[in-house]
Image (tube, rainbow, N blue to C red):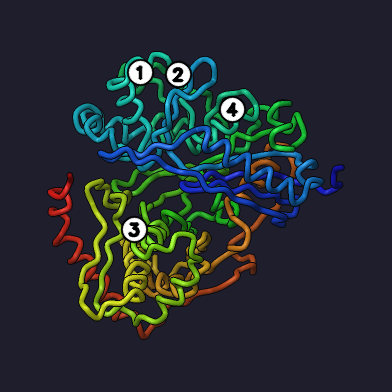
Amino acid sequence: MKSDRAVFLGVDVGTTSVKAGLVDASGQGLLQASREYPSYPMGQSRVEQSAWDWWDAATAAVRRLGEKAPALLASVRGISVSSQAPTLLAIGGDGQPLGRGMIWMDQRAEDVCREVLTLHAAYINGFSGNRLDPYYVLPKLLWHKRHEPEQYAQTWKYLQINGWLVYQLTGRCSIDVSSAALTQTLNVHTLRTEEGAFSLLGLDAGKWPEVFGCDEVVGTVTGQAAALWGVPEGTPVAAGCIDGASTPLGLGVTEPGALFEMSGQSSGIGEILREPAFHPNLCLLKHALPGLWIRKGSMSCSGGALKWFRDCVDGRSGQDFSVYSQLAEQSPPGARGVVFLPYLCGERAPLWDRTLQGMFFGLSTSTGREDLVRAIMEGTAFALRTILDEFQEPGIHEKVILGTGGGYHSRVWSQIKSDVLNCTIRVRQPDFDAALRGNAVLAMRALGMPAFERTETDREDTAVYVPDREKRGFYEERYQYYCKVFQANRRLFGENEV
């Protein structure tokens, strides 16, 4: 039985879990579900994930929606998928993955960057808008050819995570323009694959999929996929986008100059741009909508740091994170002198240093669990401050930051961020995932339907955090001290690799 309601399915593959949600034509989030999946740390800065784990987790999340509301799922009119990025996944001519995918955390291509790509840095920076770093796909692609030549030769296509799900749904290979922009294979000025880079590096451009606009239809759901997911066969599937593009779209952040922060396993601050522009320490992302870009700094481990503490230090895996918010409130600002460096996975923008490590500094016999938790929250806020400082715009602290993600369920953590960044933070709709809503917009646009619009001035905030002026001087001093602790230990991290 179907519903008369126009329903759209959004799927978002994060770094640790897949979320799926149903949204109606007015933008109302109807239902969402999630399913976790594993990563496979391989040592020596290698982190892989399985394509079938992504697909199985997505399938489980969507089927969960069907268990709760089968009529709604059976009425889905369009689908769009977003994902963490960038990733290198090779598939063979039979459509099967050739091993696991190298996700954004994987830094194994550092030698390739240093030995080969630095010779062409000006060229690559110029057409891609991004600095050279093993975070991106182009270095991983060259590493794959150099170190796994047989697998490279067997590769039919390279896909991103959302492209893999779209392939499973439709049988067609694709890469959306926002994902392509993060691979350093796209010319950001022409929005076409830079085939000259493939030729220069001796890579086969034929292994690269066709580039689609985020709101373009790639294909329709096959009978096999429809039976598995419980959606109608023939449902149009949009190309989708990276999660860093679907989230601001779902938040309604589309005005140039607007700021947003996504708070999850990793966190980052982004600013909307009209034109692509290179920044030596920040990432250039393509917005999901045509004609817009995003300048963004992303730290690698924010919510992930608290999860690490819960699972590996506190030994309370599965414990609700609200307990840690209560604990943090029992520690005073400054965490009784404890400073936490949140570099458990190295760091991306703006530091770009895989050798960085996590660290508690200032421990004593009087340090309690509450101080460690508060230090984690303050340390991640200080790391966000290093990103915000890179924007170097007059009045940057006068702007409002739109916030979303799991970290904003914590009032104390949100207030710490506001105080440290010295910015007002408006939290928007944390009860329904913004990336899922953004995907619904793309699915509607793909069908030529007038998508609902949300703007910065929509009064749908679930909370507003204003900087405490009395803490301004205190947190400025603590931030400067945090920077001193980091600088004093940075060289030692590089010497501590085992």
Indicate which disc, 2 or 3, sits on the residue closer to the N terminus: 2
From this viewpoint, is residue 447 visible? yes
**Closer to the observer: label 2 or label 4?**
4
**Closer to the observer: label 1 or label 4?**
4
Q: Which residue is mark 3?
A: 387
Contact between marks 2 and 1 (CB within 8 A): the answer is yes
Q: Quadrant of residue 125?
A: top left
Indicate which disc, 1 or 4, sits on the residue closer to the N terminus: 4
Indicate which disc, 3 or 1, sits on the residue closer to the N terminus: 1
As displayed, is residue 449 above or below residue 268? Answer: above
On residue 203, the disc is 1
Residue type at the position of mark 1? Leu
Contact between marks 3 and 1 (CB within 8 A): the answer is no
Indicate which disc, 3 or 4, sits on the residue closer to the N terminus: 4
Residue 70 position within the rendered picture, expressed as x and y whole percent measured from the top left: 78, 46
Q: Alpha-carbon distance for marks 3 and 1?
A: 34 Å
Residue 316 position within the rendered picture, expressed as x and y whole percent measured from the top left: 43, 63
Q: Alpha-carbon distance for marks 3 and 4?
A: 35 Å
Indicate which disc, 2 or 4, sits on the residue closer to the N terminus: 4
**Closer to the observer: label 2 or label 3?**
2
Q: Which residue is mark 2?
A: 207
Residue plotted at (43% across, 54% down): 265
Q: Nearer the viewer, residue 300 or 369?
A: 369
Residue type at the position of mark 3? Ile
Q: What crowding class fits label 2: few (fewer than 14 Cα within 10 Å), some (14-19), or many (20 or more)?
A: some
Residue plotted at (26% across, 51% down): 351
Q: Which residue is mark 4?
A: 167
Q: Alpha-carbon distance for marks 2 and 3?
A: 35 Å
Q: Alpha-carbon distance for marks 2 and 1?
A: 9 Å
Residue type at the position of mark 2? Lys
